[in-house]
Amino acid sequence: MAQAEALAFGKTSRQVKSEGTSDWISPHRVFEGNRPSNIIFAERLTPKTLGKLVALYEHSVFTQAAIWQINPFDQWGVELGKALVQRILPELESDAQPKLGHDTSTNALIRRCRKYKEI
């Protein structure tokens, strides 16, 4: 709720200065406001509720894509991910634990997944 209020009303330069904020940091503390947002309440998180949230998100993405005239379900980044998973899957599934040749972040994620597999 606080984030929705911040997005709606922001903070003016005058408000920031009245708080005694230093001049060098003041521009970073000013927020425009007038930014739309949504708050969604649910009594319980159930499979049905989660499905509705996912459907709402998919609809939002599709509507934005229609306005921007792009296909959000056929992006080159997705194709790259599909190609990279062909290298990662065997490293996750192998009991031999082959040497990893990815960036440090991906290597760490693979090692963590391997640990969970052992449990």
Image (spheres, rainbow, N blue to C red):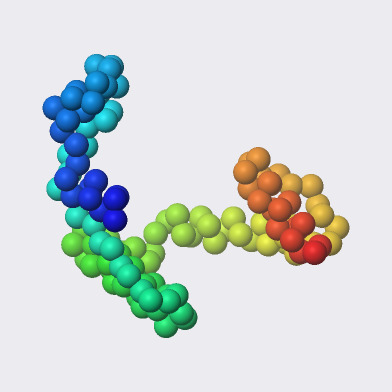
Residue 41 placed where, x, y %? 32, 70
Q: Do we see residue 27 in this rendering?
A: no
In this view, which residue lies farthest toward the bottom?
A: 48
Tally the numbered discs.
0
Tell whether 96 sits left or right of 113: right
Nearest the viewer among 65 and 2 is 2
In this view, which residue lies farthest toward the right?
A: 96
Q: Where, by quadrant of the figure, is residue 115 drawn?
A: bottom right
Nearest the viewer among 47 and 42 is 42
Which residue sits at x=26%, y=30%? 29
Q: Quadrant of the N terminus?
A: bottom left
In this view, which residue lies farthest toward the top?
A: 23
Look at the picture and state if 48 lies above or below 8.
below
Look at the picture and state if 65 lies above or below 45.
above
Residue 79 placed where, x, y %? 48, 60
Q: Where, by quadrant of the figure, is residue 25 drawn?
A: top left
Residue 90 placed where, x, y %? 73, 61
Residue 51 placed where, x, y %? 41, 78
Look at the picture and state if 99 lies above or below 89.
above
Which residue sits at x=24%, y=46%? 6
Q: Do we see residue 84 in this rendering?
A: yes
Which residue sits at x=26%, y=22%? 21
Q: Where, by quadrant of the figure, is residue 30 drawn?
A: top left
Q: Quadrant of the C terminus?
A: bottom right
Which residue sits at x=29%, y=50%? 3
